[in-house]
Amino acid sequence: MEYLTVGMGPSPMVWIYEAQFVEAAAHGQVKPGMVLLYPSPTVLSKHTLVPLKPSGDRLGRLLSTDPRLQRLAAEHGFRSNDTGSFAEVAAAHGVPVAKDPIDVVDIPSYDTLEHLLEGVAKSYG
């Protein structure tokens, strides 16, 4: 991401995932003056794995239960089932992350998203 490599430039504020900021901090890419802010309310992005084969199902189970993979996810800025690892990584790199984001808006339901997409499709013919 240009903001993390070059600095503010023409973009005094950018919208990125918490994970991107934490990972950048872990790699020494956060420059003085860069801060992580949380909008209020905020939206939590849930990453989903859809296994197509038994090996994919096994991978999904490992990603959510294996301690080494949980730690690796934390090192890349992701919150996982092992909340302690994420907190340790953030603290080690001086990133003040929200302990438990509580002012969260749920993502729209499938039906709502479908309705929105239909409206956009009608608008563009």
Image (cartoon, rainbow, N blue to C red):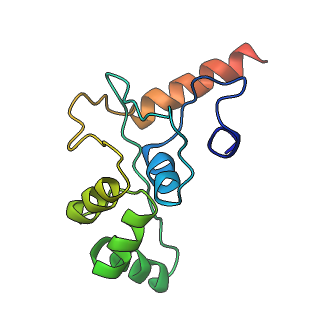
Q: Is residue 14 left or right of residue 74?
A: right
Q: Is residue 15 above or below residue 55?
A: above
Percent of width and height locating residue 109: 38, 34
* Image quadrant assignment for residue 100: top left
Q: Is residue 60 left or right of residue 17?
A: left
Q: Quadrant of the N terminus?
A: top right
Residue furthest right as drawn = 125
Residue 44 image point, x, y percent: 36, 40
Q: Position of residue 16 (x, y in %)?
A: 53, 38
**In the depicted structure, whether residue 22 falls above or below residue 9:** below
Q: Residue at x 52, y 24 (%)?
A: 115
Q: Quadrant of the C terminus?
A: top right
Most foreground residue, 37 or 5:
5
Residue 66, can we see it? no
Q: Nearer the viewer, residue 97 or 111?
A: 97
- Counting every numbered tag in the picture gives 0
Q: Decide if residue 57 is on the left or right side of residue 123.
A: left
- Which residue does the image show at 46% across and 62% down from the upper left? 76
Task: Judge whether residue 64 can be spotted in this image.
Answer: yes
Residue at 39% x, 83% y: name it. Answer: 58
The x and y percentages for residue 6 are: 70, 40
Residue lying at the far top of the rendered structure:
123
Q: 78 or 7: nearer the eye?
A: 7
Residue 7 lies in quadrant = top right
Q: Is residue 7 above or below residue 82?
A: above
Q: Residue at x 35, y 29 (%)?
A: 42
